Amino acid sequence: MSRLDRFANRIGSVLAWGFLIIVAMMCYEVMARYVFNAPTIWAHEIAGLLAAVAFIFGGAYCMAEDYHMRITSFIENRGNTIAALSKWLSIAAGAIYLTGLAYTAYRMTKDALFRYALDGSWDPERSGSTWNSPVPSFIKLALLLGTVLFLLVLLRRVWSRPTRPSAG
């Protein structure tokens, strides 16, 4: 495993704990709302942020762990040529998609985060909810960073040996 793979693995492992935090927050939210009649204004937005960030970085984690889905019946028992062709086609398709996604995420992030009010104060894109947090801006930034990490992990596969699906 390369240093980049270990980095993606570590980020994915840490962010996976976000789902446990979401469960705890939602339990707290339900109790606050229905037992104490005092709902929070932040729980749903933070839960959305945690889930989005975990899913976004999950792609790089799965690629680093070599857990991405494949159609193994197509390349199983077909020889090394088909396996190599499958590897290169999947890398090319993934690189094209992730490059386009990274570019789009960059533009969205730039428009969402680098906004300023007339008085010069920072005014990022906000949710429009009662809390009106800048969570959408940070989700867009996470999309950019997670996509770039996913792309780097994918491109690292160019220099690795082809992976063969295990039989069974």
Image (cartoon, grey):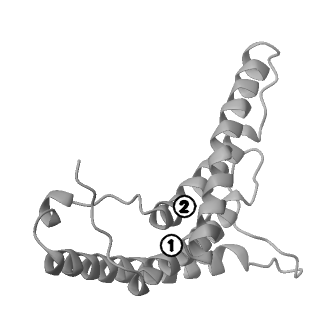
Q: Amino acid at mark 1?
A: Phe
**Residue 157 x, y percent position in the rendering:** 42, 80
Choose between 59 and 71: the one closer to the eye: 71
- Disc 2 crowd rating (10 Å Cα; few below 14, some 14-19, many 20+) is many
User: Which residue is most to the left?
Assistant: 78
- Taking the image as shown, residue 80 lies to the left or right of residue 151, namely left
Q: Which residue occupies 65% across, 61% down?
A: 11
Secondary structure type for disc 2? helix
User: Which residue is most to the top?
Assistant: 35
**Residue 107 x, y percent position in the rendering:** 56, 82
Which residue, given by chain and number where applicable, does mark 1 sit on? 150
Q: Are marks 1 and 2 in contact (CB under 8 Å)?
A: no
Choose between 68 and 77: the one closer to the eye: 77
Q: Which residue occupies 66% across, 32% down?
A: 23
Q: Which residue occupies 71% across, 74% down?
A: 113
- Above or below 130: residue 84: below
- Taking the image as shown, residue 34 lies to the left or right of residue 54, namely right
- Taking the image as shown, residue 41 lies to the left or right of residue 77, namely right
**Residue 119 x, y percent position in the rendering:** 89, 80
Q: CA distance from mark 1 to mark 2?
A: 9 Å
Secondary structure type for disc 1? helix
Nearer the observer, disc 1 or disc 2? Answer: 1
- Disc 1 crowd rating (10 Å Cα; few below 14, some 14-19, many 20+) is many
Choose between 59 and 103: the one closer to the eye: 59
Q: Amino acid at mark 2?
A: Ile
Which residue, given by chain and number where applicable, does mark 2 sit on? 56
- Above or below 3: residue 50: above
**Residue 65 x, y percent position in the rendering:** 48, 61
